[in-house]
Image (cartoon, rainbow, N blue to C red):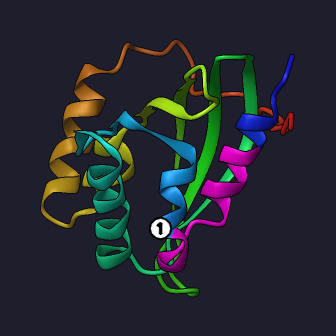
Amino acid sequence: MNNQQVKRYIRFFENLDRDSLPLTDSVFAVDARFRDPFNDVCGRAAIKQVFAHMFQTCEAPRFEVVECVGEHPLYYLHWRFTLGAPDARNTIDGVSRVRFDANDLVSEHSDYWDPAQQVYERIPLLGPLLRAVRKRLRAPQPTATTPPQTQSTTQR
C-alpha cells in the first residue's frame, strides 16, 4: 500500500495556517468536493475560502490527526480540532472521509462531527435547551456508567 499521499495530506492539515493556504492547490484536485456540517463546496478556490473563513472566525485553530485508517484510495482520519485563547481552548473531535484520485490528489473530503454537542450546546441560551432535548431522546440506562476510554494511535 502506498500511503505517501495520505501522510502528505495529514501534514498539510496539521500545519495549516493563513500562510499555507496556497498549498491547497497541491493537495486537492481541481474539482474536489469538501463537506462539513456548515459547508458543501466544490473546487480549490471554494475550499481555500472555507479555510480562510476559518482563520477569520476562529482564534488559533489547529488540527491534530490522532488516527488514520484505510487503504488507497480511501482513508478515514480521526482528528482533534482546537481553537480559542490559550487559557480557554475548545476541542472538537471528528472524522474525515478522504478519497484520492488517480493523481494522488484529494477528490473528496467529508467531515463528520456533532456540531450540536460540540458547538451549539456551548451557546448560553441555546445550550440548556439542546441538552434537555438530548436528555429526553436518550435511551434509558439501567445504571449510571461512563463509556470506556479508548487509546488513540496514529498510523502514519
Q: Please give the name of the residue rendered at 33% of the width and 39% of the height, measured from the top-left corner.
A: 36
> Is 132 situated left or right of 43 in this image?
left
Quadrant of the snapshot with the C terminus: top right
Identify the residue at image location x=52%, y=79%: 19
Please report the bounds of the magenta region as a residue range: 8-20
The residue at 55%/22% (across/down) is: 101
Q: Mark 1 points at which residue?
A: 21
Instruction: Please state which of residues 63 and 74 is positioned toward the viewer in this rendering.
Output: 74
Please tell me in which quadrant of the rendered image residue 6 appears: top right
Locate residue 62: give its quadrant. bottom right
Residue 19 magenta-highlighted: yes
- Front residue of this view, candidates 130 and 65: 65
Q: Nearer the viewer, residue 54 or 106?
A: 106
Element carrying mark 1: helix
Residue located 55% across and 28% down the image: 98
Compared with 12, 105 (above or below) is above
Asked if residue 67 shows in the view, the reply is no
